[in-house]
Image (cartoon, rainbow, N blue to C red):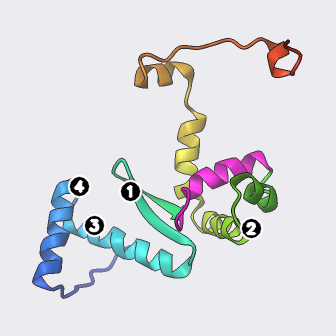
Amino acid sequence: MSQIVSLRLTDETATRLKEIARLSGRTVNEIGSTSIEEWIRQQEYAEIEFRSFQGVRHACLKGHIRVWKIIMTAQDYAMDAEKTAEHFQLPLGKIKAAFHYYEAYPDEINRPIDAISAMTFDKLKRLLPNLEAISIPAEALNGDAE
């Protein structure tokens, strides 16, 4: 369900909003709605900000990394906030902020994680035609190489 809410904007703000919509190939409604939603979330989650990466908006820790990258790493640590904070060398409170955001918006955060998890060498090769696989002897990985 959605509601129509009208806003009065200055001529300058309306012009800028229309230009952003035009450049992004989206409607003024989409840009306005997304902007308000992001602003509300930033009010609710003080450590979260939104930034664009290749035209896609992502929730990020303020001044730091995308939340999905933190959660993907945290999953390797069984969602242990302290180990994740140590990994990123960030204060525990910032990592907990990412965890809280993830609890509220798991689908949003899981989308890029799932896309990366589904990535195969063949898919990467299509994206990066010069990509080559290299083999590393097991002894080298175990520290037995001389």
The residues bearing labels 3 and 2 have C-alpha atoms spaced at a distance of 33 Å
Q: Residues within 10 Å of mark 1 (few under 14, many from 20)?
A: few
Say what amino acid the circle numbered 4 marks: Ser
- The answer to whether the residue labelled 1 contacts the one labelled 4, judged by CB atoms less than 8 Å apart, is no
Residue 66 inside the magenta-drawn segment: yes
Q: Residues within 10 Å of mark 3 (few under 14, many from 20)?
A: some
Q: Nearer the viewer, mark 1 or mark 4?
A: 1
Q: Nearer the viewer, mark 2 or mark 1?
A: 2
Against 31, residue 80 (above or below) is above
Reading the chain from its start, which is encountered first: label 4 or label 3? 4
Reading the chain from its start, which is encountered first: label 2 or label 1? 1
Magenta-highlighted residues: 61-77
| Residue that label 2 marks | 92
Reading the chain from its start, which is encountered first: label 1 or label 4? 4
The residues bearing labels 4 and 2 have C-alpha atoms spaced at a distance of 36 Å
| Residue that label 3 marks | 31
Asked which quadrant contains residue 30, the reply is bottom left
- The answer to whether the residue labelled 3 contacts the one labelled 1, judged by CB atoms less than 8 Å apart, is no
Reading the chain from its start, which is encountered first: label 4 or label 2? 4
